Amino acid sequence: MAHPETFAELVAAAGLDGHEHIGPQHLYRRVSPTTVKTFAQLYPGVVPNALVDDALRGSLTGSWQRWWAEATATSFAAQPH
């Protein structure tokens, strides 16, 4: 059974004004027996417009950089590495 009051208490305990302020930096995942990382660390975002603005393209990191380099407008098929 869901308890909305409990969720509201957790949101308030995190110092947030409402559930709409929860972001990937607030959610954690255990990645090994001794290591915990935030979702923001595991899944870094993209600077707004970085995929369409050549000047911002350099801000892409990690997987995003590789995925964008492999993307093609002519096919949804996976590209060879």
Image: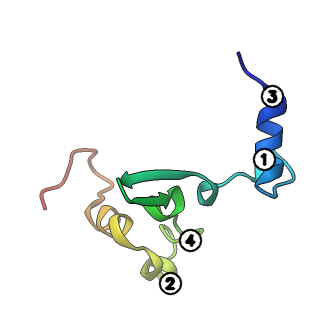
**Disc 2 and disc 4: Cα gap in Å?**
11 Å
Which mark, residue 4? Answer: 3
Q: Residue at x 35, y 70 (%)?
A: 62
Q: Mark 2 or mark 3: which comes first in sequence? A: 3
Density class for disc 3 (Cα within 10 Å; few <14, some 14-19, many ≥20) is: few
Q: Residue furthest left?
A: 80
Earlier residue among tags 2 and 1? 1
Residue 8 image position (x, y, % from top left): 82, 39
Image point (84%, 31%), residue name: 5
3D distance between C-alphas at marks 4 and 3 = 33 Å
The mark nearer the N terminus, 2 or 4, is 4
Quarter of the figure that contains the N terminus? top right
Name the secondary structure under disc 1: helix
Q: Is residue 23 left or right of residue 64?
A: right
Q: Nearer the viewer, mark 2 or mark 4?
A: 4
x, y percent for residue 41: 48, 65
The amino acid on which the numbered mark 4 sits, given as a three-letter code, is Val
The secondary element bearing badge 2 is classed as: helix
Query: Mark 2 or 1, which is nearer the eye?
Result: 1
Which residue appears at 45% of the width and 58% of the height? 36
How much space separates mark 2 and mark 1, taking CA atoms? 37 Å
| Residue of label 2 | 55
Q: Which residue is mark 1?
A: 11
- The Cα atoms of the two marked residues, 3 and 1, are separated by 11 Å
Badge nearest the viewer, 4 or 1: 1
Q: Are marks 3 and 1 in contact (CB under 8 Å)?
A: no
Looking at the rendered structure, the kind of residue marked 3 is: Pro
47 is higher (above) or lower (below) than 15: below
The residue tagged 4 is: 47
